[in-house]
């Protein structure tokens, strides 16, 4: 859900959403370009090419068609009169040269003719005819009178230019030019008319002729990666659970205990070095030369969450930038259309699939590129642009108000094709607006606002703690509802909350500054306000916790905060295209929430039994405990029944997790780069008991 830009084209406007990536500063550029290069016109530059014969014969005509023809007679007259010292030396037709046959009597101009030699002399002296590597008027082939006149016109223009700039012209050259212009007056006039007509036709072609074309491009990412640490979260293992009906179910055992003693055999996360790939093929089509239809087909093998899955590290922290939840299946990833309007100052955007707010709202991040930017998901861009997660349909606009100010708006939904929700009533929607300012060529600042509706209260960024991503763990949890010693702890007992819908409002800022031609500084931050739309129902807890029912009737709330700082150094080793990047920041953290309420999230085993796929990531919190219950399974597996503990919903994150990242992109050539990188996450999930996670990868990117 990030390329050089062109100041002529920008912005969008299609209902509520279009373009993206314009003030984005590519990590290779020397300036922060403010205008999106993808909004540029696709207009084809047309050039008139002369025939092979003319190119072989000194390329005279090709040179002449690139400049306007001037009236030849007036040219020489002005030239002679401009040089007062030469007025008295006006050309005399009765001088010694008159013994040569008049060229007007000749059908063609041969190398032995006076006119041919005269033009050769002018061409070599004033460099007025191009077409040969040494710049000389070479060749020994006969020219037609029109070919000859084309070359003569070029020399007359060169002489006129020199006289205008008060350069000295030899009197004999002026006389020669005057005589040639008179001898070829008819041909010069004819050529002028032909070239004027040709230029008129060329302008029509440039304005109207366009052939619908489709461009093919692709990207392949190959990466070898590993992760260390993280105990907990992680320490999970796959287990098989025997059910009473005789069926078996796969469950995930994450640190299960009996009588407060660990019984799990997975004391540390079970992960090995992996080799993963990500590939996408794109088709880009233009129908007018300025619009763009883009489609991407994507595949990859980083399925089941990769290192983030409960079977591995059970947290979003080790998520890669290029990670896709695919199992070697080819899927449609992006389908979008962009159309510039209003003299290319507004660009309208429409997406049928693969929409994200960052498709239209410029991320203003130097590392927003899955193949050439940061290696982690969090370091790519401000998580505010990911609110809404992977949506399908969307629309927007990008408006270049001035060369210094730009406004963008975007709206997208999830499951917009379902009749019960549609584009405007879907169960998840996000509306974003952004103002970009570029006070200098080296500074771009952005102010972003996002308003979203979530049917389950989740943010959808998949970069922060589970507590922050779910805004307090409300949806899908239980409130204790039974009396007695059980206390509502067993699965299936308690008041199911189901989905808790919420309204989300977020404000954020981005900043980029090219301190020098090589050194870039970036920063971003966002604060998110979430207000649930349902009230907390009444519940009972055996009287053990006084006042717990006092929260009944209240609407929960949750506020999250995140920030990051980045430094980029271009060409640090003198290698063009290389990039050294540093990122430091705090992933989204739940900093304010309430009311704090006793509650319980659904245990892993029950999620699997209910065929909930994928099994939810929990940061290993709340901790899972077990109790013996022979009625649930057979005697061999009775210890696998998870009891769970009554946790607190609507609570703040207890600690602070920090993200440190460094990577170096080696640019092999324009199509290949290799990026080794490492990032470290302390207190994963903002939980103090969780060990630091270390992630390393070597990413190879091939583009074509």
Image (cartoon, helix red, strand yellow):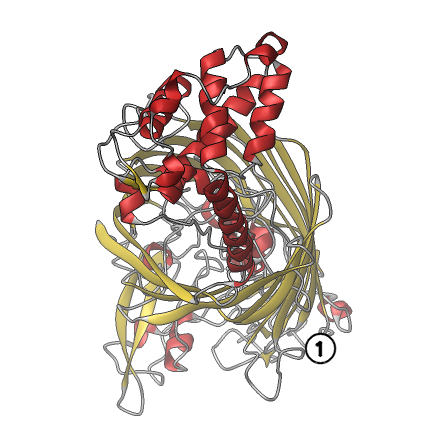
Give the answer, above or below, for where 45 lies relative to 209: above
Residue at the image point whose x is 63% and y is 52% from the top: 652
Residue 537 percent location from the top left of the image: 71, 77
User: Looking at the picture, how far across and down is residue 467, in whole percent?
Assistant: 56, 57
Residue 188 lies, in percent from the top left, at: 48, 41
- Work out whether 594 lies above or below 3: below
Q: How many callouts does the rendering have?
A: 1
Decide which of 190, 635 is in the foreground and name it: 190
Q: Quadrant of residue 680?
A: top left
Viewed as shown, does residue 304 lie left or right of 433?
A: left
Is residue 536 depicted above or below 681 in this figure? below
Which residue bears the numbered disc 1?
A: 537
Report which quarter residue 59 is drawn in. Answer: top left
The reply, left or right, for residue 538 in relation to residue 235 is right
Sort mark 1 into few (<14), some (14-19) or many (20+) by Cα contacts within 10 Å. some
> Of all residues shown, which one is farthest toward the bottom?
245
Q: Is residue 289 visible?
A: yes
Give SS at disc 1: loop
Q: Residue at x 57, y 32 (%)?
A: 73
| Residue 3, placed above or below residue 130 | below
Q: Would you say 652 lies left or right of 319 here? A: right
Please report the residue visible at 56 percent of the width from the left and 48 percent of the height from the top.
36
In this orientation, which residue lies closer to the viewer: 314 or 494?
A: 314
| The residue positioned farthest toward the top in the image shown | 85
The percent coordinates of residue 116 (x first, y second) are 32, 29
Q: Is residue 256 visible?
A: no
């Amino acid at each position: 859900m990030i390329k050089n830009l062109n100041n002529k084209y920008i912005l969008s406007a299609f209902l509520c959403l279009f373009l993206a990536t314009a003030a984005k500063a590519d990590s290779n550029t020397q300036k922060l370009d403010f205008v999106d290069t993808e909004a540029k016109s696709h207009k084809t530059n047309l050039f008139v090419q002369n025939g092979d014969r003319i190119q072989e014969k000194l390329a005279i005509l090709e040179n002449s068609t690139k400049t306007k023809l001037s009236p030849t007679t007036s040219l020489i007259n002005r030239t002679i009169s401009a040089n007062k010292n030469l007025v008295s030396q006006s050309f005399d037709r009765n001088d010694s040269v008159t013994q040569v046959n008049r060229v007007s009597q000749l059908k063609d101009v041969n190398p032995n003719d006076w006119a041919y030699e005269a033009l050769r002399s002018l061409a070599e002296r004033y460099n007025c005819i191009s077409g040969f590597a040494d710049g000389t008027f070479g060749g020994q082939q006969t020219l037609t009178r029109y070919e000859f006149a084309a070359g003569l016109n070029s020399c007359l223009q060169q002489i006129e230019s020199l006289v205008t700039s008060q350069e000295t012209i030899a009197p004999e050259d002026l006389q020669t030019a005057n005589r040639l212009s008179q001898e070829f007056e008819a041909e010069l006039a004819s050529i002028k008319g032909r070239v004027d007509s040709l230029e008129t036709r060329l302008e029509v072609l440039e304005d109207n002729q366009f052939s619908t074309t489709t461009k093919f491009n692709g990207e392949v990412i190959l990466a070898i990666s590993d992760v260390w640490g993280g105990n907990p979260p992680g320490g999970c293992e796959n287990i098989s659970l025997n059910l009473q009906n005789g069926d078996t179910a796969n469950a995930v055992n994450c640190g299960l205990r009996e009588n407060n003693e660990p019984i799990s055999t997975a004391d540390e996360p079970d992960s090995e070095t992996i080799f993963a790939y990500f590939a996408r093929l794109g088709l880009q089509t233009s129908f007018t030369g300025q619009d763009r239809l883009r489609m991407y087909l994507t595949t990859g093998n980083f399925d089941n969450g990769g290192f983030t899955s409960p079977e591995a590290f059970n947290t979003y922290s080790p998520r890669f930038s290029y990670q896709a939840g695919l199992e070697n299946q080819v899927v449609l990833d992006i389908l979008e259309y962009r159309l510039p309007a209003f003299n290319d100052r507004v660009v309208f955007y429409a997406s049928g699939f693969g929409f994200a707010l960052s498709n239209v709202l410029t991320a203003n991040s130097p590392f927003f590129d899955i193949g050439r930017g940061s290696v982690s998901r969090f370091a790519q861009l401000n998580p505010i642009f990911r609110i809404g997660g992977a949506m399908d349909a969307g629309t927007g606009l990008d408006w270049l108000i001035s060369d210094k100010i730009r406004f963008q708006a975007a709206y997208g939904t999830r499951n917009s094709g379902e009749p019960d929700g549609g584009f405007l009533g879907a169960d998840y929607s996000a509306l974003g607006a952004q103002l970009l300012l570029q006070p200098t060529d080296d500074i771009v600042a952005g102010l972003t606002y996002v308003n979203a509706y979530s049917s389950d209260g989740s943010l959808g960024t998949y970069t922060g703690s589970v507590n922050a991503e779910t805004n307090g763990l409300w949806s899908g949890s239980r409130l204790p509802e039974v009396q007695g010693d059980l206390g509502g702890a067993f699965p299936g007992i308690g008041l199911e909350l189901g989905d808790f819908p919420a309204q989300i409002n977020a404000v954020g800022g981005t900043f980029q500054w090219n301190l020098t031609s090589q050194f870039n500084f970036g920063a971003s931050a966002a604060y998110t306000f979430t207000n649930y739309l349902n009230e907390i129902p009444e519940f009972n807890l055996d009287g053990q916790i006084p006042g717990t029912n006092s929260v009944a009737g209240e609407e929960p709330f949750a506020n999250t905060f995140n920030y990051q700082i980045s430094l980029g150094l271009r060409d640090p080793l003198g290698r063009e295209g290389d990039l050294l990047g540093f990122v430091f920041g705090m992933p989204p953290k739940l900093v304010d929430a309430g009311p704090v309420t006793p509650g319980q999230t659904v245990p892993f085993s029950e999620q699997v039994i209910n065929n909930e796929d994928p099994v939810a990531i929990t940061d290993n919190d709340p901790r899972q405990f077990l109790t013996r219950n022979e009625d649930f399974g057979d005697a061999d597996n009775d210890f696998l029944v998870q009891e769970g503990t009554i946790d607190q919903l609507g609570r703040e994150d207890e600690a602070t997790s920090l993200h440190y990242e460094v990577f170096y992109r080696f640019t092999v050539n324009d199509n290949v780069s290799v990026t080794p990188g490492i990032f470290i996450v302390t207190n994963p999930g903002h939980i103090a008991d969780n060990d630091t996670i270390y992630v390393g990868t070597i990413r190879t990117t091939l583009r074509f």
